[in-house]
Amino acid sequence: MKILIIGGHGTIGRKVSAHFSEHNEVLIAGRTNGDFLVDIEDSSSISKMFEKTGQLDAIICIAGEAKWANFNDLTEDDFHIGLNSKLMGQVNLVRLGKDALNPKGSITLSTGILADDPVVKTTSAAMVNGGVHSFVQAVALETENGIRVNVVSSGMVEDAYEKYKDYFPGHNPIPMKKVVNGYVRSVNGKGNGEVIRIYD
């Protein structure tokens, strides 16, 4: 397969890219480096990327950000960081990417445990993750040409444990192999409209 991974150089992206590279042609896109540069907050940037990639068999997004702060400190602009990046950025990847996919291709988005089990300072991130989950379940009802859309929602991954452990007291770090398998399930399986939760 020819697979495009947006965010393929990140903490999770590196492991996912390494796995799929073993038996597939993997292209990596990112904001600052990769085979293609893309800003997922900018739909025109997304369109230009797909003009260069050619037809694909799978698209994986492991990108998008949201502001972490106490609710009382979050401004409207702070909320728009997550809305523009992790929510609409991924929505636009589906909206524009579906036309770059071969029949029976797949799109896999990424969220996280905050949609179901939020912690302090994650009001914006939790809201955006939940929105992506609802979007995936709804858009799967309307996809054509056998195209499937799923989302992988992981708990705190072991490779980011030291960085985020203070935010997630008592949470068990998720082995990277389990996280990678979530993306394998989405790309190589037959599920559509699935929220693939990897929380323990």
Image (spheres, rainbow, N blue to C red):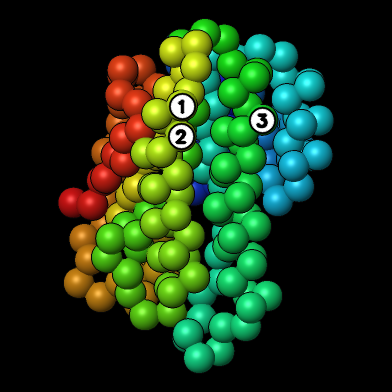
In the image, 145 versus 19, the foreground residue is 145
Picture coordinates of residue 92, whole percent (x, y): 63, 40
Q: How far apart are marks 1 and 2 (CA)?
A: 5 Å
Question: Residue 3 sits in which quadrant?
Answer: top right
Query: Where residue 142 is drawn, which disc sits there?
Result: 1
Query: Where residue 162 is drawn, which disc sits there?
Result: none
Q: How crowded is mark 3: few (under 14 residues within 10 Å), some or many (20 or more)?
A: some
Picture coordinates of residue 56, whole percent (x, y): 60, 15
- Direction from residue 186 to residue 109 in the image, left or right: right
Type of amino acid at the residue the image marks with label 2: Val
Q: Mark 3 points at which residue?
A: 96
User: What residue occupies the far front of the structure in this picture?
Assistant: 142
Can residue 26 be seen from the camera position used here? no
Type of amino acid at the residue the image marks with label 3: Leu
Query: Where residue 139 is drawn, which disc sits there?
Result: 2
Q: Give yes or no for contact between labels 1 and 2 (Cβ–Cβ under 8 Å).
A: yes
Q: Residues within 10 Å of mark 2 (few under 14, many from 20)?
A: some
